[in-house]
Image: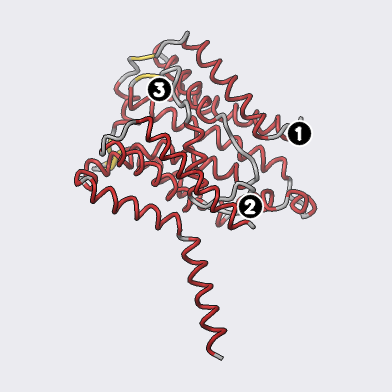
Amino acid sequence: MKLPNEKAMKINIGELLLKAKSLIGLLGLIIAFSILSPRFLDYYNLTNVLRQTSLNAIMAVGMTFVILTGGIDLSVGSILAFSSAVTAGMLKDGMPLIIALLAGLIIGTGLGLFNGFVIIRWNIPPFIATFAMMTIARGLTLVYTNGQPITGLGKAFGYIGNGYVGSIPVPIIITILVFVIGYYILKNNRLGRYVYATGGNLQAAKLAGIDTNKVILFVYALSGFLAAISGLIITSRLNSAAPTAGQGAELDAIAAVVLGGTSLSGGEGGIIGTLIGALIIGVLNNGLNLLNVSPFYQYIVKGVVILLAIALDKKESE
């Protein structure tokens, strides 16, 4: 009589470890880099890790919503660049800070909304639609900036990326707020249930009376909005809007979501996992830099980590 209970206990422990694989991986990286580089646990270095992670983490929240619906957004890096370039250009021309910030956020949201519109209205696969937007927004950025960085944006704007509230950097505070709001929507709001339902089974969600078109519009608009926020932070921090800003950012955002356990097929995952995934990317980047690993090899390491995460996701879904 004890054997079935023991077997059930082993299965439960195995499932628990499987769900906690991302957290175990993060802790493993922290321990490894702490041993290999004593500087890793320095307070200022850890603060720097969190500050750098915040840019990817904010975009990854929007990407989580998109992937939960079964979609993908390859345009976030280019939306980041264009929205921040417009904000920088307006500041350079003497526009009030609040107007320039709102313009950047509206552009990011609008481009994301257009992604959703193209997907639902023309029935274009998300991969193709957002790939097209990635190219369009990058082109708009190059045209707007004439291929040159926009600098000299003022001290007030610089507070967003370099300021502190007490001893906590402003980007970290913004990231915490974004994650709290994202978590609340997915776990305690009807809209969050609609997002999961849309990704879990689109046709069943429609039959249940859910307006899946509005859900898709929302998640892509949110993704564009959060990409714009990340753009404002990095532009503020560098006091410059570069036309090449955000190149490859979409891959890091997708990697954070996948490493956090969100299924690429949609309908399964969450914000907490994405936070852990973003921290894995941030810790990995920082630790490899401290060890003076060539950036060329860093790409290989990150690629292998992402490949393993996708392989585990596929194995779980079988």
Dot 3: few (<14), some (14–19), or many (≥20) neighbours within 10 Å?
some
Q: Residue furthest top?
A: 146
Give the quarter of the image for residue 122. top right
Give x and y (percent) for residue 49. Answer: 31, 41
Q: Name the element at disc 2.
A: loop
Q: Which part of the image, by quadrant, shows the N terminus?
A: bottom right
Mark number for residue 123?
1
Mark number for residue 97?
3
Q: Amino acid at mark 1?
A: Asn
- Counting residues from the start of the chain, the first of labels 3 and 1 encountered is 3
Give x and y (percent) for residue 77. Answer: 50, 28
- Judge from the rendering whether residue 135 lies leftward or rightward of residue 21; answer left or right: right
Q: Residue at x 60, y 19 (%)?
A: 136
Image label count: 3
Q: Name the element at disc 1.
A: loop
Nearest to the eye among marks 2 and 3: give it: 2
Distance from label 2 to label 3 (Cα)? Answer: 39 Å
- Counting residues from the start of the chain, the first of labels 2 and 3 encountered is 3
Query: Taking 40 as reference, is 133 above or below it?
Result: above
Mark number for residue 267?
2
Task: Please tell me which residue lies in front, 195 or 70.
Answer: 70
Q: Amino acid at mark 2?
A: Gly
Q: Amino acid at mark 3?
A: Leu
Give x and y (percent) for residue 267. Answer: 63, 52
Distance from label 1 to label 2 (Cα)? Answer: 20 Å
